[in-house]
C-alpha cells in the first residue's frame, strides 16, 4: 500500500466512525455532512420570512444611499 491508499482507507474509516457516532447520539439515520451538521428542510413560511427581511434590508440600504 502506498501513502495515498492508506489515506483513502483512513478517511473512509473516519467517515464510518462519524456516522456511527451520530447514530448512537440519537441521529435519525441521515448521514451528517462534512462539518457534522444535518441540514433540516425549511418551510415555505420560513423561506418567505427570510425573503421579506432581506428585501427590507435592501430597501433601507437603497433609501440610505439616496440621501
Image (cartoon, rainbow, N blue to C red):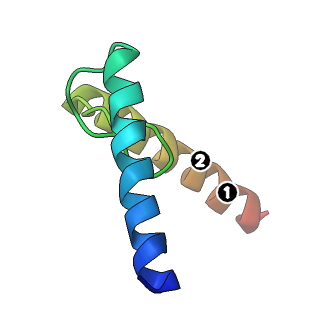
In this image, 65 relative to 37: left or right? right
Residue 13 sits above or below residue 25 on the image: below
Tag 2, which secondary structure? helix
Observer-nearest residue: 1 or 55? 1
The reply to whether the C-beta atoms of the residues labelled 2 and 1 are less than 8 Å apart is yes
Residue at image x 34%, y 30%? Answer: 20
Residue at image x 45%, y 61%? Answer: 10
In this image, 2 relative to 28: left or right? right
Residue at image x 44%, y 61%? Answer: 11
Quadrant where the N terminus is found in the figure: bottom left
Observer-nearest residue: 3 or 57? 3
Residue 19 image offset from top left, x and y in percent: 34, 36
Disc 2 crowd, CA 10 A, few/some/many (<14, 14-19, 20+): few
Q: CA distance from mark 2 to mark 1?
A: 6 Å
Tag 1, which secondary structure? helix
Residue 36 image offset from top left, x and y in percent: 47, 40
In this image, 3 relative to 49: left or right? right
Observer-nearest residue: 41 or 9? 9
Q: Which mark is residue 47?
A: none
Observer-nearest residue: 21 or 43? 21
Residue 45 image offset from top left, x and y in percent: 25, 27
Question: Farthest front residue?
Answer: 1
Residue topped by disc 2: 57
Q: Quadrant of residue 52?
A: top left
Residue 64 image offset from top left, x and y in percent: 74, 57
Q: How many marks?
A: 2
Quadrant where the C terminus is found in the figure: bottom right
Residue topped by disc 1: 61
Disc 1 crowd, CA 10 A, few/some/many (<14, 14-19, 20+): few
Residue at image x 38%, y 65%? Answer: 9
Amino acid at each position: 500500500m502506498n501513502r495515498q491508499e492508506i489515506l483513502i482507507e483512513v478517511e473512509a474509516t473516519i467517515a464510518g466512525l462519524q456516522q456511527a457516532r451520530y447514530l448512537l447520539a440519537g441521529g435519525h439515520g441521515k448521514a451528517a455532512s462534512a462539518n457534522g451538521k444535518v441540514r433540516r428542510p425549511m418551510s415555505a413560511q420560513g423561506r418567505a420570512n427570510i425573503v421579506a427581511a432581506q428585501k427590507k434590508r435592501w430597501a433601507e440600504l437603497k433609501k440610505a444611499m439616496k440621501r
